[in-house]
Image (cartoon, rainbow, N blue to C red):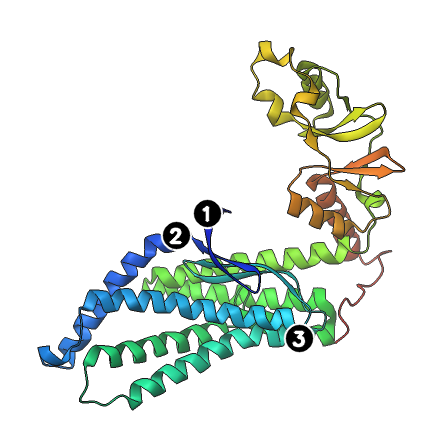
């Protein structure tokens, strides 16, 4: 059980960790209670005689809640299986309060595969829904009421899950399908922008509907779609720009750092003068790691003059000047250092932090919008 952003691992599938978000544990008893009420109400409405109800409503409610999460997991597994089959990479599957999230770190190369990868999830849900409804229909009417009702209700939920995910808006699967269909015609960046516009338009429609019907769930959906559209287009633009740049084009040139032997107080002075949250740590002209402002401010002032940078140094993550800037960004996200050290033949020539990457992206996007000088977007994925 390894914690990571509020989730813990419950198992794995093809070596990919399956995690459950804590919010789900809170919502599980609530759902069990709500579904229990649905079961009680359904038996009453159908005027089922007590001997034919078949079980405690609350337990059936709990079974429904677990069944719903199992359905979401199957939906995610369909995505993951397809991604793996077509050369994608998946880091984790996390079940959350609003559904499942598969962290696909490397998308399939062809846009056709991306469309299909997005499509297999909803298709699995729709298929599962149809199957459950068929089994419920085949059960004899003279039998117990609750099992039949559970199957048809879970079937209905799966149909909803499948249909809802086909809504053409990020972060729903439908958004990816729409983008994948547009990529061949207009390239990845424009396709993502168009799909994001469609998503924001739909979010607005959902928001108005939520206001008119006073439905908080619909309001939440509108919010998730709006922020999803924003995040997705940002991510794609970032990648498109950074993939064309080398580290030396985005780095801050820097040939000096904090000496490993200098005191904590001296290092803090250097960091404050440089106005940086972190600086490289140097020993005998060789960069050996980096020192973080936060690590030094946590030490009390008298103690700060007694410790050296060596006591607080963190291991370096290195890149080369000719490395791809997108790869550098991936390294930064995976290892979570606020700073990458750029080394040329073992010597420090610069540093890259999130600010450097953002500045590079903004610069190139603004020059693209002016229409001057910047080459046309290279199409990343041949359709
Ligand atoms: Zn999906």
CB atoms at circles 3 and 2 under 8 Å apart?
A: no
Q: Tell me, yes or no, if residue 176 can be seen here.
A: yes
- Report which residue position mark 2 lands on: 23
| Viewer-nearest residue: 92 or 154 | 92
The answer to whether residue 309 is above or below residue 164 is above
Q: Tell me, yes or no, if residue 168 can be seen here.
A: no
Question: Can you tell which mark lies on residue 113?
Answer: 3
- Report which residue position mark 1 lands on: 6
Instruction: Tell me how far mark 1 sits from mark 3, CA to CA.
Output: 31 Å
The answer to whether residue 287 is above or below residue 363 is above
Q: Position of residue 381 (x, y in %)?
A: 75, 70
Q: Secondary structure at mark 3?
A: helix
Q: Position of residue 77 (x, y in %)?
A: 52, 69
Q: Secondary structure at mark 1?
A: loop
CB atoms at circles 2 and 1 under 8 Å apart?
A: yes
Count residues near mark 3 (Cα–Cα under 10 Å), then give few for <14, some for 14-19, many for 20+: many
Quadrant in the rendering for residue 278:
top right
| Viewer-nearest residue: 154 or 218 | 154
Disc 2 or 1, which lies upstream in sequence?
Answer: 1
Left or right placement of residue 27 versus residue 266 in this view? left
Instruction: Tell me how far mark 2 sits from mark 1, CA to CA.
Output: 8 Å
Left or right placement of residue 108 versus residue 80 in this view? right
């Amino acid at each position: 059980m390894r914690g990571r952003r509020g989730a813990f691992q419950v198992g794995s599938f093809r070596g990919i960790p399956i995690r459950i978000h804590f919010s789900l544990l809170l919502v599980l008893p609530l759902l069990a209670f709500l579904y229990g009420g649905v079961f009680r109400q359904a038996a009453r409405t159908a005027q089922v005689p007590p001997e034919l109800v078949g079980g405690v409503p609350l337990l059936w409610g709990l079974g429904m809640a677990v069944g719903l999460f199992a359905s979401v997991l199957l939906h995610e597994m369909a995505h993951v299986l397809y991604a793996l089959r077509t050369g994608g990479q998946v880091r984790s599957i996390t079940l959350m309060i609003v559904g499942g999230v598969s962290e696909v770190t490397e998308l399939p190369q062809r846009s056709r595969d991306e469309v299909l990868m997005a499509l297999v999830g909803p298709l699995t849900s729709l298929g599962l829904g149809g199957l459950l409804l068929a089994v419920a229909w085949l059960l004899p009417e003279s039998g117990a009421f609750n099992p039949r009702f559970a199957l048809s209700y879970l079937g209905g939920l799966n149909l909803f899950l499948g249909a809802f995910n086909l809504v053409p808006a990020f972060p729903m699967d439908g958004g990816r399908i729409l983008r994948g269909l547009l990529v061949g015609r207009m390239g990845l960046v424009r396709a993502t922008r168009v799909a994001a516009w469609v998503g924001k338009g739909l979010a607005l429609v959902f928001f108005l509907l939520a206001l008119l019907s006073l439905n908080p769930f619909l309001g939440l959906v509108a919010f998730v779609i709006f922020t999803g559209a924003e995040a997705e287009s940002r991510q794609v633009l970032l990648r498109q720009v950074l993939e064309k740049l080398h580290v030396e084009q985005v780095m801050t040139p820097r040939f000096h750092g904090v000496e490993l032997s200098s005191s904590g107080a001296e290092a803090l002075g250097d960091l404050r003068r440089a106005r940086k949250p972190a600086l490289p740590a140097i020993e005998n002209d060789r960069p050996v790691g980096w020192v973080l402002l936060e690590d030094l401010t946590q030490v009390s002032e008298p103690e700060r003059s007694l410790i050296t940078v060596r006591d607080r140094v963190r291991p370096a993550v290195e890149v080369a000047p000719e490395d791809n800037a997108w790869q550098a960004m991936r390294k930064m996200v995976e290892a979570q250092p606020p700073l990458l050290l750029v080394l040329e033949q073992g010597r420090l020539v610069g540093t890259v932090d999130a600010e450097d990457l953002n500045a590079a992206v903004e610069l190139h996007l603004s020059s693209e919008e002016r229409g001057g000088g910047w080459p046309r977007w290279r199409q990343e994925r041949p359709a």
